[in-house]
Image: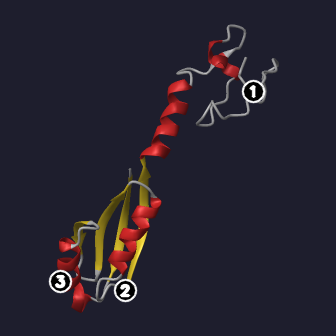
């Protein structure tokens, strides 16, 4: 399942008409708009192709000047990220090494990706 947010643009004089059309449209869910002509909607689809078909429906609504995807969520993408996180160790192995002086560890925000320069012991890519 994919979910994407869309910013729809129209001229302010057509905002009420476009909002009403979007609310009636089965291709999207209306969320909010402002008086400058911007409308926020979301679309859902089993895949990108389905989302693109729905985007074309939205673009074909009278007085819609543009409809641009802003953010997207994909369950498939989330699943692959969760798999990596679930298979990762909670604490990097290097932090459990008994012969490393904690003063020698320089933290730069992410020890899993950090090149641990300054250690006298050389570690391979697995951190062992």
**Circle 3: element type:** helix
Task: Identify the residue at horizontal 31%, vertical 85% (top origin).
Answer: 10
Relative horizontal placement of residue 56, taking residue 125 as reference (left or right): left
In the displayed orientation, state which residue is furthest to the bottom.
Answer: 13
Task: Identify the residue at horizontal 52%, vertical 21% (top origin).
Answer: 90
**Circle 1: element type:** loop
Residue of label 2: 65
Residue of label 3: 16
Residue 125 numbered tag: 1
Work out whether residue 93 or residue 85 is closer to the camera in this orientation and state it.
85
Relative horizontal placement of residue 94, taking residue 85 as reference (left or right): right
| Few, some or many residues within 10 Å of mark 3 (<14, 14–19, 20+) | some
In the displayed orientation, state which residue is furthest to the top.
Answer: 98
Labelled pair 2, 3 in contact (Cβ < 8 Å): no
Residue 49 drawn above or below residue 60: above
Residue 108 drawn above or below residue 60: above
CA–CA distance in space, label 2 to label 1: 51 Å
CA–CA distance in space, label 1 to label 3: 58 Å
| Few, some or many residues within 10 Å of mark 2 (<14, 14–19, 20+) | few
Q: Position of residue 127 (x, y in %)?
A: 71, 21
Work out whether residue 20 or residue 104 is closer to the camera in this orientation and state it.
20
Please identify the quadrant where the C terminus is shown.
top right
Q: Which is more N-terminal, label 1 or label 2?
A: 2
Residue 109 drawn above or below residue 29: above
Between disc 2 and disc 1, the foreground one is 2
């Amino acid at each position: 399942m994919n979910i994407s947010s869309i910013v729809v643009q129209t001229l302010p004089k057509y905002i009420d008409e476009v909002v009403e059309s979007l609310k009636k449209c089965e291709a999207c869910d209306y969320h909010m708009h402002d008086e400058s002509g911007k409308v926020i909607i979301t679309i859902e689809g089993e895949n990108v192709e389905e989302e693109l078909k729905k985007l074309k429906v939205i673009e074909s609504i009278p007085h819609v000047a543009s409809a641009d995807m802003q953010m997207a969520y994909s369950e498939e993408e989330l699943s692959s990220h969760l798999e990596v996180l679930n298979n990762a160790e909670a604490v990097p192995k290097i932090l459990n090494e008994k012969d490393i002086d904690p003063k020698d560890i320089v933290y730069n925000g992410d020890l899993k990706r950090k090149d641990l320069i300054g250690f006298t012991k050389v570690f391979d890519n697995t951190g062992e």
